[in-house]
Image: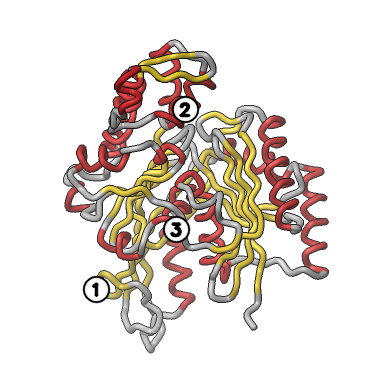
Amino acid sequence: MSKRTTLVSIDVGTTKVCTTVADVNDNGDIRVAGVGVTPSRGLHKGLVVNINDARESIRESVRKAEQISGYKVESAYVGVTGRHVSSLNNRGVVAITRNDRLVRPDDLRRVLACAQSVKVPSDRKLLHVIPRGYAVDGQVGVKNPVGMHGFRLDVETHVITAATTSVQNLVKCIRGIGVDIDDLILEPLASGEAVLTEDEKEVGIILADIGGGTTDIAVFKDGSIWHTAILPVAGYQLTRDVAIGLGLPFDVAEEMKKRYGSVMPVYESKIETTGAISEDGHGVSYQDLCDIIRARVEEIIRLILLEMPRAEYETLVPAGLVLTGGTANLSGIDALGREILQLPVRVGVPTDVSGITDTLRDPAYATSVGLLLWGAKHKTSQVWKSHGFGSGLRRLVSRIKNLFF
């Protein structure tokens, strides 16, 4: 009988906070036991701007997930996003000095430590150092060099850093409700776990998670991360354009965007007849609404292209673009992407989970599911919770830390 472990993810977004509780077995299969979703307060473009409001939003989300799952949340995998995130590719080199010239796990640790010795300013925090590929005596394309013979071991890594204060504010909100943090994960990396296939990552693909406050971009190539970037434009700016352009309250503009919005509108007979749509007593032209939405979405797609590390994106990412996040629910967004890029474009929906998944089968929850998948994939390097004495001790230590944070 396979052993099951409980995993929790908290996606603190600009428009919603989603806490997901799931059981994971030894094979990495995930069964969702509870989901808690609440409107997000105290955040702007992925950053905490009001700690008290943000903490209460997270507390309510966690409480809902606990109520549904019957599990007490003690620690969680947490997503990080925001314009403050930056990345670079860096190399590391070490010599294999033993007589047998055999690469061992210790050599991997040494070469990764060398690669992460990049100078990080005091106001930045190192989030990830992800190996992209190894080379043994100049032989490139090595995925796992352990057991190979050689004199020299090279690694190319993708290094991701974030502003220390922004991360500290998020950590403070979560620890403030008595929840410890298993790991901080860049959100587009998590989303990629949920909606991309291994073949797509190998061939070369762009992932764009268009959320409420930010568009998170990750480029994958040769089975690993190639480039990451965060754009401070997303669904919020789209709704604001609709509100300003059509003279609507923000809440009404948001509802109209979700209910009627399309970037490739099909004028149904009822709309052709009346030419108008209404919500809460406000009437606007359907064509005007769709024209505004299309213009902003087209701009976001072109901004994604500008973030590519090199101009000839067709050869870098022949598998095209996968759109996810709440804004990817807009009707026709994949067709518009194909029209602009002349490459395959699809909307990514998380599917590799079972259990209570009705809510999660939606692009808006790609990060929430991806955080769980990331945790399951990297569980061998994590200290896992038990349900005995160790769990209680861990929680006590966490509470004592909170007193002095």
Query: Farthest residue in the top direction?
Result: 247
Asked whether 86 or 137 is in front, the reply is: 86
Q: Position of residue 177 (x, y in %)?
A: 75, 43
Task: Report the mark closest to the observer, 1 or 2.
Answer: 2
Residue under label 3: 193
The one of 160 and 221 positioned closer to us in this rendering = 221
> Which dot marks residue 139?
1
Mark 2–mark 3 Cα distance, whole angstroms, equals 25 Å
Instruction: Identify the secondary structure beneath mark 2.
Output: helix
Instruction: Say which residue label 2 marks.
Output: 236
Labels 1 and 3 touching (C-beta < 8 A): no
Q: Tell me the quadrant of the picture where the C terminus can be found.
A: top right
Disc 1 element: strand
Q: At which x and y percent is residue 366?
A: 48, 50
Residue 79 locus on image (x, y percent): 55, 47
Q: Between marks 1 and 3, how big is the CA–CA gap? A: 28 Å
Badge 1: how crowded within 10 Å, few (<14), some, or many (20+)?
few
The residue shown at (58%, 37%) is 16
Q: Could you tell me the amino acid type at mark 2?
A: Tyr
Quarter of the figure with residue 217: top left
The three-letter code of the residue at mark 1 reads Gln
